[in-house]
Amino acid sequence: MLKRFLLLLTCAVSVFLLCGCEEFREAMELGGTSENPMSEDYTARFVVGIFSEVQYPRATELEREIEMPSGRKVWINVNQSFSSKNLRDCRVVVRPGNPDICDLQFKFDKRGRTIWEMLAGRHRGEAVILAVDGRGVGKFIPEFPKNNSNWVTLRVGVDAYTARGIAKYAKANYDYYNPDAASWFHWMLEM
């Protein structure tokens, strides 16, 4: 009877894992993405955008209200200061004593480093909004990269799921937004 129950339970879990919701499958896939960013059906996920907060909104077309994880709504300037287009790689930095809260380390391309330095200079001591797929996920004060490094730490304090998702899809999203010349003619290879 116990063997039969365990077999049934194993089958039920297998069916749930194979046919369950996409978020569950994404949460279970902690390794690199198996999707090819150069394929036509690739969809960018965990797309990063950094926006300036608008202190006194006028509700113009350049401003939009987004909700933060706390439930509080903030207004942002829709012209993003930085995006996944210049984010080559990402690492997750777990906060000591609290594995559910993470900071991020971003690696830029050459243009991204310049954009980041302008962002850090323009917002010196002032918080900016980190958004992922159009949702506000945290605020942080941008820092300058140290020692001519292309890596910078964002002390943003996002949840572990979001941090792992950003890290997992950063390289694929970068390739998607910055295709190399060979990918422009991929359709010729498929003929």
Image: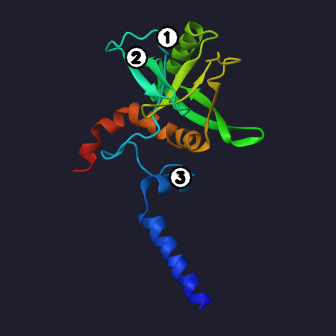
Taking depth in this image into account, of 25 and 90 the one nearest to the observer is 25
Q: Find numbered disc 3 in the image and state the secondary structure of the residue it sits on.
A: helix
Taking depth in this image into account, of 119 and 10 the one nearest to the observer is 10
- Name the residue beneath numbered marker 1: 55
User: Dot 1: within a 10 Å radius of its alpha carbon, few (fewer than 14), some, or many (20 or more) residues?
Assistant: few
Q: Amino acid at mark 3?
A: Ala
**For residue 66, what is the image quadrant?**
top left
Mark 1 and mark 2 lie on one chain; the one further toward the N terminus is 1
Query: What whole-number distance in Å separates the C-alpha atoms at marks 2 and 3?
Result: 30 Å
Examine the rendered structure and indicate whether residue 72 appears above or below residue 117.
Answer: below
Mark 2 and mark 3 lie on one chain; the one further toward the N terminus is 3
User: Dot 3: within a 10 Å radius of its alpha carbon, few (fewer than 14), some, or many (20 or more) residues?
Assistant: few
Q: Amino acid at mark 2?
A: Asn
| Residue 167 rendering spot, x and y as whole percentages | 56, 39
Q: Which mark is residue 79?
A: 2
**For residue 177, what is the image quadrant?**
top left
Q: Amino acid at mark 1?
A: Gln
Quarter of the image for the N terminus: give it: bottom right
User: Residue at horizontal 65%, vertical 17%?
Assistant: 143
- Name the residue beneath numbered marker 3: 27
Specify whether residue 29 is in view.
no
| Residue 32 rendering spot, x and y as whole percentages | 53, 49
Horizontal side, residue 5 vs residue 38: left or right: right
User: Residue at horizontal 40%, vertical 36%?
Assistant: 176
